[in-house]
Amino acid sequence: MAIGVKVVARPSGIAQDMYVSAVVKGLGVTMRHFFENLFGKKHIVTVQYPEERAVYPKRYRGLHRLMTRDDGSVRCVACMCCPTACPAHCITIVAEETGNGAEKRPAIFEIDELRCVVCGLCVEACPCDAIRMDTGIHAPPVEHRGDAVLGKLDLLAHTGKSEAHQGGLGGEWRGAPPVRTG
Amino acid sequence: MTPPETQLPAAPATVTLTIDGRQVTVQKGTNVLEAARAQGTDISYFCYHPGLSSPAVCRQCLVEVAGQPKLVPSCYTPVADNMVVITASERVLTARRQMLEFTLVNHPVDCPICDKAGECTLQKLYMEWDGHPSRSDVNKVHKPKVVDLGPTIVLDAERCILCTRCIRVCDEVAHQHQLTMAFRGDHEILTTAPGQVLDNPYSLNTVDVCPVGALTSKDFRFKMRAWELYTVPSVCPGCATGCNVEIHHAQGQAWRLVPRPNPDINKFWMCDEGRLTYKELTRDRVVGARLGDDPAPLEKAINYAAERIEQVRQEGGTVAVVLGAQATNEDLYLAARVAIDVLSARVFIAGRPAVPDRVDEILRSADVNPNSAGAKIFGRAAAGGIPELERALQNGELSLVWAIGEDLPLSEEAFAALDDIEMIVQASHEDELTAGADVVLPAAMWAEVDGTFTNVQGLVQRIRRALDAPGGAKPHWELTAAIARRLGVSVDEPNVRALFNEMKSKVPEMAGAEWGRPQPLVQLRFANSRG
């Protein structure tokens, strides 16, 4: 069965053809908002950044940060899970030996924030809670593309203490779950 | 059972048995695991390796055999006529799952920092068989980590699942007892044998056979994750044996070579030196053409080379073409065709000098060129070697030398004599020869070209292009063809495949050569474990 076609009558007439009434009506709306905002109730949605800041949702994904262990060393073990998961290929890691028990750490850890699509898959992929996007900082404007590439020290500068249970739970994992702080 | 006939018939060389309800006929003496594999049923295992003996220590390949009360390890059980094997009953699967759980009791499961992750047999079997969190509520036994076993290998004893494959590689492949197990029970660890270090020339095979990340190669450790690598089948260029290898590459760079099984040549193994030949791909490469010391466009350098050859011919001088044994059959076939049939040049065969120390009865050959046999075939009877070339140079018999490859181990006097004559070299690496040559043309290396090598047995084996040549480097045959065309020689093969076909039809020694099928580029993350 063919689909029926409903023909809608186009409005016509001299007033319609001249657009004058429509222009006046539209300007009326504009002027009403103008005077209301000037003298009466404010409807302005523009945030006067940077004097005013919008309130971001709790799970807002901002610039990345690298977490540290209790002793201040970087938590990242250069497992390459985040660059593997990254759909934008914006993470570059070069691993090195630590020479201590942790075995492996990143010698180079770079994120190109211009390439980043802010999907958060790197955070999901990380087995060590080493990378997070909870800084709340949105990517700042940069003069040169290279300035948007954040290195290990830049990312560590955003740091806070990790909430993850350090070193796993070992044989105690059947016991009470660890108390999460914060 | 019927009593034997008075005249016994010859025992058949094959055995027919039933595996999972399907009949399979295999060679006598085969084990059940291989028989199942031949029939298309994979049985999981850790300690078994087709190139090694079977100690049956991992118990991961247990199967049910009708009439036997206990499950039997399939790697250790030879096939027998009318045997009925069940590989996937509930009893078998439970036993294997439980064995896997035992294996994992003390394994640290530190896959994120383990180099084997992505190609680990334990990881793969856990994902296939178990996939549950640990039920063990005792602390794991801690063992030494980052133990230096020798110049090439680091051991993490915690990850080791005590399969003893590495011990058997040293014992049965390298014939040196350098590894052993110490202590007992859950304190058992792998360690070097008393007074030994793991330094045999086949030590890195232990890393390949390790089903977990216990043994890691110092050279490859932490460099690249296995799942990022692409694999391309090729042939080791390290010596005349021609071990089959896989080039593992990513990001336009080769990261390691691993052996590719070939029962006729290298079985499952290759030597440590051969594995490091990939480093040659980035060492001191010639990246652009040069006229003397001045960089020049490739076109100009080729034109100049052709002009010089033409001039020498018109003046009645002698052109010498040196066939380097590092180049492929196709390169050398074309060079020899141009040299002998058109230029009537004198042909010499060169290559890297032999290293008599490295020869052994296993794989390593003293000749460190991958294609010496090919060079001999194409040089035909007239070709001289390095001594003849030295003599000709010192007697001033030559006016121009055109070398395919930069490896010319000449004596000092002969080298000095090169200064007086024209020298055109198609080179991959910068060295003394390229420093003094009149024309240097950048040549691609083995991992950057398609072609074939002839090994010491006369087997013609295919090498495949895995990487882009650096800078403006071109395959030898393209450079040779470009010079030849400017000399008025018709070289109408559009690609190396056509050249191979022509070579195959013209050279009787190459009649059996196969180009092989195109290989899809496989990333290791889709290739399962290699352990």
Image (spheres, coloured by chain):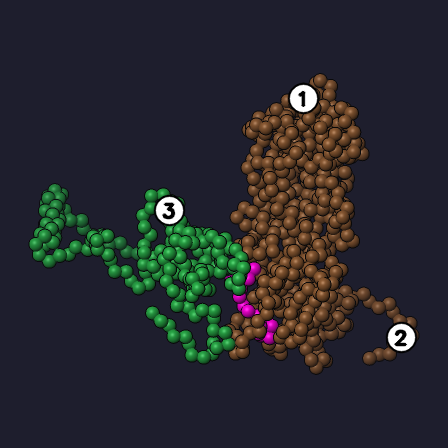
Chain colours: A green, B brown
Residue range of the region highlighted in magenta in the rendering: B99-115
Q: Secondary structure at mark 1?
A: helix
Instruction: Describe the element under mark 2 as helix, strand or loop.
Output: loop
Front residue (pair B81, A156): A156
Task: Answer above or below: position of A68 versus B308.
Answer: below
- Vertical side of B109 occupied by B232: above or below: above
* Residue under label 3: A147
**Splitting the image into 4 quarters, where does residue A65 fall?**
bottom left
x, y percentage for residue B426? 64, 33
**1 or 3: mark nearer the eye:** 3
Place of residue A42 in the rendered image (x, y in percent of width and height, measured from the top left): 13, 57
Label ID, residue B5: 2
Point out residue B509 in the picture as x, y percentages from the top left corner.
Answer: 77, 41
Which mark sits nearer the N-terminus, 1 or 2? 2
Instruction: Say if the magenta span includes residue B227.
Output: no
- Asked if badges 1 and 3 are on one and the same chain, I answer no
Q: Label 2: how many residues lie within 10 Å, few (<14), some (14-19) or many (20+)? A: few
Protein chain holding label 1: B
Identified by mark 3, the residue type is Asp
- Give the residue type that dot 2 points to: Glu
Query: Is B236 situated left or right of B380 in this image?
Result: left
Q: Are marks 1 and 2 in contact (CB under 8 Å)?
A: no
Can residue A91 be seen by looking at this rendering?
A: no
Q: CA distance from mark 1 to mark 3?
A: 56 Å
Tell me the subunit letter for badge 2.
Answer: B
Residue bearing mark 1: B310
Locate the N terminus of chain B by quadrant: bottom right
Classify mark 1: residues with Cα within 10 Å, few (<14), some (14-19) or many (20+): some
- In the image, A41 versus A81, the foreground residue is A81
Could you give the CA–CA distance between mark 1 and mark 2, rounded to whole angstroms?
A: 83 Å
**Residue drawn at (73%, 34%), measured in percent from left and top?**
B410
